[in-house]
Image (tube, helix red, strand yellow):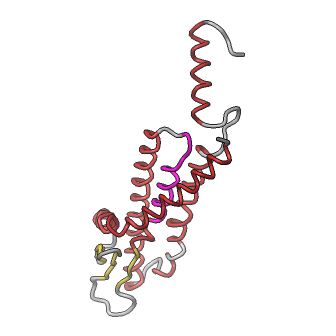
Amino acid sequence: MGYARRVGLSATLAVLILVVLALGWRYIGPSYDRILAASARPFGAPVVSIQAEGMELALRYRGQEESGPRWTRIKGLSLAYGPLLVTALILATPACAWRRRVLGMVAVWLGFLVVGVGAVALLSWGLAWTVEGGPFTLAGLAPVMPMVYVGLPAVVGGAWCLKYWLPHAGSTSPATGRRTAMRRDTRRRAGTSTG
């Protein structure tokens, strides 16, 4: 099978995996949101409660001030479509060992969880500063969220595709590159040079 056909089939598989993951998110999402909320609480503003409510995160101001917005909600799927997209790309990667795919998925989910915790904590501080007055408001922090939930997945997914989906110099797949390196090592042990 040619390289273009293999990548085309893998891209189609990635879309199908993404659809299945998005449909399954209804069942997995609330657990992820609870983990995210519990992890963000220690870093958030002390006067803002962070709770997972179904498929959303709710941030509520607990102070005595009556002015300004007192709560905001974040859709749970918007917190996870980045890792879902990158997971689909990783699972559908042509000619990549399953061990590398699993390690890549674990790294992606842990990385996005850490970034998500930071983003949710920052939003809680933004809510507190909006109500109490502070260096930033919730509206001022709004441009940060697309960078986290759109820009970061694009960079991570693009880097994965660049490394594992595009042909390598002198080989058509990472597997062929490994065989070439193994032949070179065998020749070195035998005392011959490859040039």
Spot occupied by residue 1 in the image (x, y as percentages of width and height)? 64, 41
Instruction: Say left or right for 132 vs 88.
Output: left
The residue that appears at 52% across and 40% down in the rendered structure is 96
User: Which of the 4 image quarters holds residue 28?
Assistant: bottom left
Q: Quadrant of the C terminus?
A: top right
Residue 87: where, in percent of width, then height?
47, 54
Q: Nearer the viewer, residue 100 or 19?
A: 19
Nearer to us in this view, 65 or 191: 191
Image point 42% across, 70% down: which residue?
77
Magenta segment range? 81-95
Q: Quadrant of residue 52?
A: bottom left
Foreground residue among 126 and 80: 80
Q: Residue at x 53, y 70 (%)?
A: 146
68 with respect to 85 (left or right): left
The residue shown at (53%, 56%) is: 14
From this viewpoint, which residue is outermost toward the top? 191
* 158 drawn magenta: no
In this picture, is 193 found above or below 13? above
Q: Is-magenta flag for residue 93?
A: yes
The majority secondary structure of the magenta stretch comes to helix
Q: Position of residue 154 (x, y in %)?
A: 57, 60
